Image: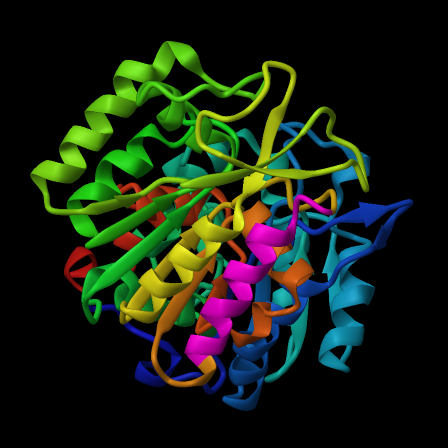
Amino acid sequence: MAFQTLDDVSLAGVRALVRVDFNVPMADGVVTDDTRLRAAAPTIEKLRAGGAKVILLAHFDRPKGKWVQEMSLAPIAPALSAVLRCPVAFVADCAGKDVEAAVAAMGPGDVILLENVRFYPGEEANDPAFARALAANGDLYVNDAFSAAHRAHASTEGLAHILPACAGEQMRLELNALDRALGRPERPVMGIVGGSKVSTKLDLLSNLVTQLDKLAIGGGMANTFLFAQGHEVGASYCEKDLADTAREIIRLAGLHNCKLFLPIDIVVADKLAPGAPARVRELGAMDDEERILDAGPKTVERLRRAMANSKTLVWNGPLGVFEIPPFDRGTVEAARAAADLVKAGKLVAVAGGGDTVAALHHAGCAEDFTFVSTAGGAFLEWMEGKILPGVAALSKQSQR
């Protein structure tokens, strides 16, 4: 998709309305993880360097169109100021006279953060009147919030049809990485999809088997596929009512020449607890009270070889219960193998999704992947092949 970036527009003196994702972890009014603030910094700094006035739009939590003091963005301003090492003023509204006055007082390079856009019902309703009220304070719309791009809201989609629009630096990185992973990838392309439930990833699996050359399925959802093939799963989490669905996905994979990788050995335990005695079992050789909690060593080695024979990897979801050792071993070893291939220049590896990011950080190799998306739902919907409204609105064609 062709879209404008900050390199394509004049910035001097421009009032830039920048949609960012500042839905960050908070405790007692203090930001506890500034990852998303740091992700927005390159866009803000580029705008400041170009002489733009930077006006930040964001949401926090789900106030559902009402003013909820605990969901104010006010505490984020000082945290962002620390990241940027410059003053960030906060305005206790996102449209209207107070905002107009604050913007009028800005000089080139100044930064202000507006109040939670979701305090207004017009935000999530994508109300044209609310979008126009936001647009009244800007000359340029910059969308840097890929993680909210699957929402057709006033600040994520509506503004792009009112003001000249472009992608911010983080958005540009996301879109370019995703294009390398599934849009125009170097083949063979392999996917790893984990997590607990097949039911939450039906669209994802159904799309990926039509796009990929190889697909590995892990985590709790693999249990459903093993059960569908007649293997015993003991006391493991398993959506047995989706066995027919699993068999249909296996059929689709064969139809589209996508090789499926399911576990060939498993790690089991009687209970899920840190340090619980873990045993490696062959398929079909587990006791009724045992639970499958991780991929076995033969499975991980098989994935390692499959990745080594691929050019591109897309990863969403862990292979086991990585939060509780020793059931993190499969995910950690597979992730480190992928990272080694990236560092050797043999693989492009793109990963995303909340659990995936946490798992890669746990494995100590998130920084070694080609790209790790901080988006959750948007990354998942993109992998499902769905059109993301916030991204589609940035296309040059939509703005003609």
Count of numbered marks: 0
- Which residue is at 49% across, 19% downward? 238
Q: In the picture, residue 260 is in which quadrant?
A: top left
Q: Nearer the viewer, residue 167 or 283?
A: 283
Image quadrant containing the C terminus: bottom left
Q: In the picture, residue 284 is in which quadrant?
A: top left
- Which residue is at 79% across, 33% downward? 273
Q: What span is colored magenta in the figure?
A: 326-342
Where does residue 85 sit, x and y in percent of width and height?
Answer: 77, 82
Image quadrant containing the N terminus: bottom left
The answer to whether 42 is drawn above or below residue 376 in the figure is below
Where does residue 103 sit, x and y in percent of width and height?
Answer: 62, 67
Q: Main secondary structure of the magenta part?
A: helix
Q: In the picture, residue 190 is in which quadrant?
A: bottom left
The answer to whether 59 is drawn above or below residue 395 in the figure is above
Q: Is residue 145 visible?
A: yes
Residue 361 is a magenta residue:
no
- Which residue is at 27% across, 65% downward? 179
The answer to whether 83 is drawn above or below residue 303 in the figure is below
Q: Residue furthest left?
A: 255
Where does residue 322 sit, x and y in percent of width and height?
Answer: 65, 46
Q: Nearer the viewer, residue 156 or 217?
A: 217
Q: Is residue 83 left or right of residue 217?
A: right
Question: What's the colour scheme?
Answer: rainbow
Q: Is residue 92 left or right of residue 150?
A: right
Q: Residue furthest top?
A: 241
Where does residue 293 sit, x and y in percent of width and height?
Answer: 61, 35
Q: Is residue 164 visible?
A: no
Q: Residue furthest right?
A: 28
- Which residue is at 32% across, 61% downward? 306
